[in-house]
Amino acid sequence: DETLQFRRLTVERLLGQKNFLEAFEALQILAADEVATRINRRDNRHLSVEMTWWLRGQFVDLWKGLPADTLSKLDARIARAAANIDNQDRQSMERFVALFGFHGVAVPLQMELAEAYAREGALVAAENLLENLRQRPEPTIAAQAVERLARLFDDYGLKADAIRYYNLLENNYADVPLADGTTAGEFVSKLRR
């Protein structure tokens, strides 16, 4: 639709002008107004992408080019948005994670959603969130995700997968502390006894 196209072009113009705060605000408006829709790619009109994923890509690209002063302002905005999410509102949590899963403030929400999915038997959804967390650059977060992946597969009786993650935990994160304060190496060592 023309309004959507105009807003997309506005974001591109603002980014081109390096007007990052206004570009962020324009993306937030698009995110707030978004309905479940697909948009055509500009380089190939025969391919489309879900609007949520286009928005996430725009936020990620915006983040990569931010100067330090703007980054700190937008970090604070995203942190406030995360703090305002009601953890009982699954849809808001999923939406925030879909848009801002790249940001550190989304980590607790991702872990909480992964736990909820695991409790509900949604193995693939839990695994996907934990795998995304495993790719984060922070060793503590990555180790906690690997540990939870190992336990997840263990809980589902998928022993070979669980062993693979326990080995990964021991080999790659042995000295990294887990949520309970023990190191990953100590955790795996206790399991072997």
Image (cartoon, rainbow, N blue to C red):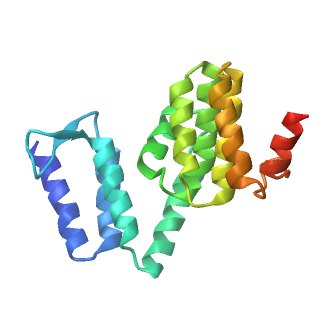
Q: Residue at x 51, y 57 (%)?
A: 103
**Residue 56, x across and y down, in percent:** 36, 51
- Is residue 128 visible in the rendered structure shown here? yes
Quadrant of image for the N terminus = top left
Q: Residue at x 83, y 43 (%)?
A: 187
Which residue of the protein is positioned furthest toward the right in this rendering? 193
Q: Quadrant of residue 8?
A: bottom left
**Residue 86, x across and y down, in percent:** 59, 40
**Residue 110, x across and y down, in percent:** 57, 43
- Is residue 84 visible in the rendered structure shown here? no
- Please state if 166 lies on the left or on the right of 40 as rendered: right
Q: Residue at x 20, y 64 (%)?
A: 12
**Residue 141, x across and y down, in percent:** 65, 53
- From the viewer's side, name the closer residue of 21 and 190: 190
Quadrant of image for the C terminus = top right
- Please state if 33 lies on the left or on the right of 100 as rendered: left
